[in-house]
Image (cartoon, coloured by chain):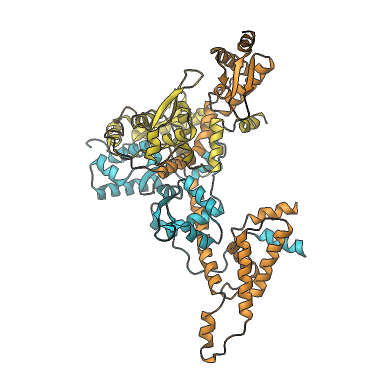
Chain colours: A orange, B yellow, C cyan
Amino acid sequence: MICMEYNVKLDGFEGPLDLLLHLIQGLEIDIYDIPMAEISEQYMLYIRAMNVLELNVASEYLVMAATLMAIKSRMLLPKHEEPWEEDALSYEEDPRDELVEKLIEYRKYKKAADHLKDKELERGQLFTKPPEDLTGYAPDETDGREPLKVDIYDLLGAFNKLMRRKKIQRPLSTKITRQDVSIEDRMKEILENVKASKDPKPFSSLFPVAEKPHMVVSFLAVLELVKRKEIWIKQDQNFSEIMVQTTEGVSLVGQS
Amino acid sequence: MASHNVYAIVESLLFTSGDEGLTVEQLMDVLTLSEDEVLKIMATIREQYLQEDSRGIQLVEYAEKYQLATKAGFSDYIKQLAEAPSPATLSQASLETLAIIAYRQPVTKVAIEEIRGVKTDRPVQTLLSRGLIKELGRAEGAGRPILYGTTDEFLDSFGLNNLTELPELPESMDEDDADQGGDLFFESLKKGLE
Amino acid sequence: MASHNVYAIVESLLFTSGDEGLTVEQLMDVLTLSEDEVLKIMATIREQYLQEDSRGIQLVEYAEKYQLATKAGFSDYIKQLAEAPSPATLSQASLETLAIIAYRQPVTKVAIEEIRGVKTDRPVQTLLSRGLIKELGRAEGAGRPILYGTTDEFLDSFGLNNLTELPELPESMDEDDADQGGDLFFESLKKGLE
């Protein structure tokens, strides 16, 4: 139980930088003046907890742990005795500089990501419609077969657009177009269909309508037909196409 | 319901439902209004669209369903738009259709239209004459509809060696798709029987 | 042109082209008007849609294309029709990666990983397959790593007209950014180790 809770929250961090930002936030410390001892301790607590819970600690977290330790020990080293420019020097050579810079850089994009998320949600509130089919109007887009100036990203982009739109459309359309087919009717259809050819038919061909209710009814109809020994279902080997044929066909083959 | 203008709500609903259209019952549901009230609203909207010269769309009623359509007078402009030269690229409609065929082949036009939610005659025609798709045979079942798949020309145009090089779709999309197509058939079955 | 109201023509064209959208150039072509004239007409139309309470749709401009979309306030009604579709939003990892690419493009995966401090293969894969980013070419130097950038579909998905509409990167940091990332973890961690 506890384990699950940890698991969920581990997913909440996007890496060692994210974790560090969180710790800094939690400890209410100044990002420009991080107390290394404290932050290292907290960080190691976290890593140890992950180990105790036998969670896979990604290598990035371990590298960061080593980095923190290194910075901590460098901070403990006595400073050079150069009193006249100590301030400037110690500022420039603060062993934390690089880490702080990274944290700040990362935090910038983390915030930008939050903003993008808002934009995405906002945009998700608006719905569009697909382009009309202009069949009958234009000549094809095709004449003069020059090479297409489209690439795979155009294809993926178009598909993404479709999927965004479809979120709204699909349920709408099934709701409207649903036609209740009875299992009895579907059994008759399937049996006729299967009997129509002497060769076995692929199982998947028994689901011509890509709609859940119709598919479910079709499946139940197939089960019922199998139970009544009106059709046979066979599969030559694992993962090969499941084939369906009438029992008549099978007995004929058996006899010959 | 509250503060929103009922005509605006109806327009947004009509707009999103596209070719599928909306039945009186659906409108009654969403608006929580009686049939008479809905009919009255629809009559008003129809009038408004017709009356206003600055409107290019109208309310039509096919097969007991309301939908929006462009007014008749504008077909010349739409034709011009369709004819505008864009020879070297594909329209959004064609790209969508091609994507569906590439990922779902062999697939019928009805299945494509089911996914896209609109008629897809022209995109299929375009893709055929471009040599990007071809007929693979015919599906079983009523009408034995034509099955479409992509061609070598398609692979060429998109710089692919074979279909396995198509980028994998994100999982969320796969799920969406499975619902339509039946790859995850047993998933749907389970849901259906619950 | 003649007798038809130009606003009505534009509306019919916008309706027809759906989420493929229309460029200024296309509108100039069909309407045989100058760019300025078209821009003025579009601004007027945008205002009209927004002003009129009885309108449920609006004119938006994403990726430098005009398209019609429902007004924001109506999503609740639309969702009722659609049985609550869940918006498939991107994961935090993908959003961070996308943010870095959007602001830093063209950018290599190594540079992204440098900023995030973690491996970023999967987010990049997801973004590619969603068509939100694309390969822009290859960087000079060792290994000639791939450079990534955002696509028009990115702009459309996030409601942006162009990249300049991205808000400025926050340079100086206010300290009170509400980080809800892992308080629960931290809490339970403390408890667990006490």
Quadrant of the frame with the C terminus of chain B: top right
Residue A147 placed where, x, y %?
Answer: 31, 39
Quadrant of the frame with the N terminus of chain B: top right
Residue at the (66%, 66%) spot, across then down: A43
Vertical position of residue A129 compared to residue A213: above or below: below
Q: Locate residue B139 relative to residue A73 in the image: left or right.
A: left
Viewer-closest of C63 and C103:
C103
Residue projecting furthest to the right: C194
Residue projecting furthest to the bottom: A84
Residue A11 placed where, x, y %?
Answer: 63, 54
Residue at the (47%, 24%) spot, across then down: B64
Vertical position of residue A25 compared to residue B70: above or below: below
Residue at the (71%, 51%) spot, across then down: A4
The answer, for residue B162, to whether it is visible in the render is yes
Residue at the (54%, 42%) spot, across then down: C76
Viewer-closest of B112 and A83:
A83
- Total label count? 0
Residue A204 placed where, x, y %?
Answer: 56, 25
Residue projecting furthest to the front: A256
Residue A117 placed where, x, y %?
Answer: 52, 53
Q: Locate residue A57 relative to residue C90 in the image: left or right.
A: right
Viewer-closest of A235 and C122:
A235
The answer, for residue C179, to whether it is visible in the render is no
